[in-house]
Amino acid sequence: MVSLQLDGVAAGYGRAPVLSDISTPPLQGGQLVALLGPNAAGKSTLFRRIFGLLRGPGTVRIDGARTDRPIAYMPQDNGARPVLSVYESILLARMQGGRLTVQPQDHAEVERVLALLDIGHLRGRHVGDLSGGQRQMIGAAQALVQNPQILLMDEPTSALDLSRQIGLLGLLRRLARDQGLLIIVALHDIGHALRFTDACMVIRDGALAACGPTATVVTPALLKQVFKVEARIEPCSKGHPQLILD
Ligand SMILES: Nc1ncnc2c1ncn2[C@@H]1O[C@H](COP(=O)(O)OP(=O)(O)OP(=O)(O)O)[C@@H](O)[C@H]1O
Ligand SMILES: [Mg+2]
């Protein structure tokens, strides 16, 4: 099973440090992990550092990878070229890494993720003509089509309606469990983190404030300390933990 461990990881832009000394235990495949933290805390910066778009001190250690490109990254802002069709933009994402010849397997993978995300009806549309939520689903497809073992998704549900938010998070949790993937999602919805994620990392002012099982880490004390809100976490009538704002 794949695992990811950070040891003393730091990053910044130019001379301005953003992240300092982030160390985690090994995060094992088979889990959906939430990356939580206020705006500007450094969540997107951490994803860029793990994916290798930013350099810095410390080590990002990956064990148990089957390929030399085990990570895929879905950025917060979709960079898909607006003139491409949905099908082409997903196929292009599949071809990352410099391969030039499209194989039948690549088309099969595009079809697989179109069906998985229920976006097959968009295949012929130009990416630039899509709604914000539709574009976000294309971003998820571009990441999934790479068949990664570690998937970093930066706020993948921020533009989705409620049913698609829970649909995507439920799908990601299933993929993680069934296929042994490690999927890390940056989220602002603490309720979704409580409901869907196995573990969470909390970033505050560029440092790791907490890391562990979501149910243990996300407490009223943490929400007060990190997000400055008074809140309770109580089970609903079906026993699921719910966030209640006071
Ligand atoms: N390209 C950049 N150049 C310079 N500074 C940047 C750049 N990108 C981000 N920053 C700064 O780094 C800090 C962390 O930003 P980051 O995007 O990682 O936050 P975040 O936790 O993802 O926030 P959000 O929840 O708003 O997406 C912020 O102060 C931001 O202004
Ligand atoms: Mg961000």
Image: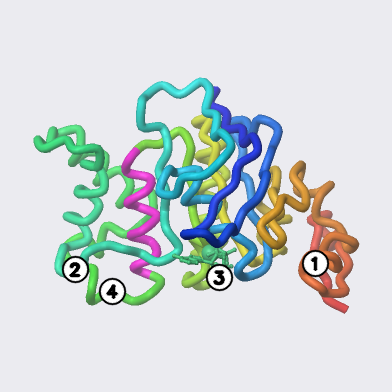
In contact (CB < 8 Å): disc 4 and disc 2: yes
The residue at the point 81 percent across, 50 percent down is: 217
Q: Residues within 10 Å of mark 1 (few under 14, many from 20)?
A: many
Q: Mark 4 vs mark 1: which is more N-terminal?
A: 4
Which percent across, then down, holds residue 104? 14, 34
Q: Residues within 10 Å of mark 4 (few under 14, many from 20)?
A: some
Q: Mark 3 vs mark 4: which is more N-terminal?
A: 4
Q: Is residue 99 above or below residue 15?
A: above
Q: Mark 2 vs mark 1: which is more N-terminal?
A: 2
The residue at the point 70 percent across, 44 percent down is: 199
State how far apart marks 3 and 4 are (Cα): 18 Å
**What amino acid is labelled 2 in the image?**
Arg
Q: Mark 2 vs mark 3: which is more N-terminal?
A: 2
In contact (CB < 8 Å): disc 2 and disc 3: no
Residue indicated by mark 2: 125
In contact (CB < 8 Å): disc 4 and disc 1: no
**What amino acid is labelled 1 in the image?**
Leu
Identify the element where label 1 is drawn: strand
Who is closer to the viewer here, 122 or 100? 100
Which percent across, then down, holds residue 188? 63, 66
Residue indicated by mark 1: 243
Give me the disc on residue 130: 4
State how far apart marks 4 and 2 are (Cα): 7 Å
Residue indicated by mark 3: 162
**What amino acid is labelled 4 in the image?**
Leu
Identify the element where label 2 is drawn: loop
